[in-house]
Image (cartoon, helix red, strand yellow):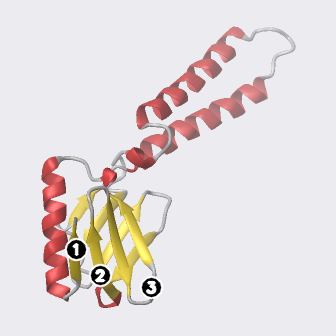
């Protein structure tokens, strides 16, 4: 397998598509962590629920870890759109599978202001929200690589 160069991979921000923003998720995780630590410190009575505190502590640390790992590149790039020689590869996060779109099965690519649609010859449509692509340089590189990919494989590219 050829090595991945940074010039053919577009980094994505999956937190831009979630219902709750990244900072609210981090804040919620920190709030639950502070609550359980305070409850653990303040609970010295003989009818204390030590086991419940440990479970809640483990759950809040797990949630905070999930949010940090899924939305930031702590363990490497987790969300990306990659232009390989014969495929368009989309990975939307650490815990999600890759979606591979072969170039020979593409009928058309439609690029609009907020969405990228890839129409397959079989009639399927793959839609990708462009709000995950952040930064003007990254957006320009994305459009340039998409044009190059469509030209190399003879796929019609419609830009709106």
Badge number at residue 158: 1
* Location of residue 140 by image quarter: bottom left
Q: In the rendered view, does 140 fall on the left or right side of 49?
A: left
State the image coordinates of residue 95 (x, y, percent, origin top left): 50, 59
Q: Are marks 2 and 3 in contact (CB under 8 Å)?
A: no
* Location of residue 114 by image quarter: bottom left
The residue beneath circle 3 is: 123
Of callouts 2 and 3, the N-terminal one: 2
Q: In the rendered view, does 12 fall on the left or right side of 5?
A: right
Please name the residue shown 44% across and 89% down the image: 122
Of callouts 1 and 2, the N-terminal one: 2
Is the residue 107 above or below the residue 33 in the image?
below
Q: Nearer the viewer, residue 28 or 123?
A: 123
Please name the residue shown 81% across and 16% down the image: 48
Q: Which quadrant: the N terminus?
A: bottom left
Badge number at residue 5: none
Residue at the far front: name it. 160
Please name the residue shown 37% across and 57% down the image: 78
Q: In the rendered view, does 87 fall on the left or right side of 71?
A: left
Of callouts 1 and 3, the N-terminal one: 3
SS type, badge 1: strand
State the image coordinates of residue 40 (x, y, percent, origin top left): 68, 17
Badge 3: how crowded within 10 Å, few (<14), some, or many (20+)? few
Q: Are marks 1 and 2 in contact (CB under 8 Å)?
A: yes
The residue beneath circle 2 is: 108
């Amino acid at each position: 397998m050829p090595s991945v160069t940074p010039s053919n991979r577009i980094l994505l921000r999956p937190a831009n598509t979630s219902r709750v923003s990244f900072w609210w998720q981090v804040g919620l995780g920190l709030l639950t962590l502070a609550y359980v630590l305070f409850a653990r410190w303040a609970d010295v009575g003989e009818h204390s629920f030590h086991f419940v505190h440990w479970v809640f502590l483990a759950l809040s640390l797990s949630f905070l870890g999930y949010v940090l790992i899924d939305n930031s590149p702590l363990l490497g790039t987790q969300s990306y759109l990659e232009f390989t020689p014969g495929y368009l590869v989309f990975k939307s996060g650490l815990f999600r599978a890759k979606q591979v779109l072969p170039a020979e099965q593409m009928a058309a690519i439609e690029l609009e202001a907020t969405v990228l649609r890839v129409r397959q010859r079989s009639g399927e449509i793959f839609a990708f929200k462009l709000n995950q692509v952040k930064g003007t340089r990254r957006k320009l590189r994305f459009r340039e690589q998409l044009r190059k990919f469509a030209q190399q494989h003879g796929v019609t590219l419609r830009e709106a």
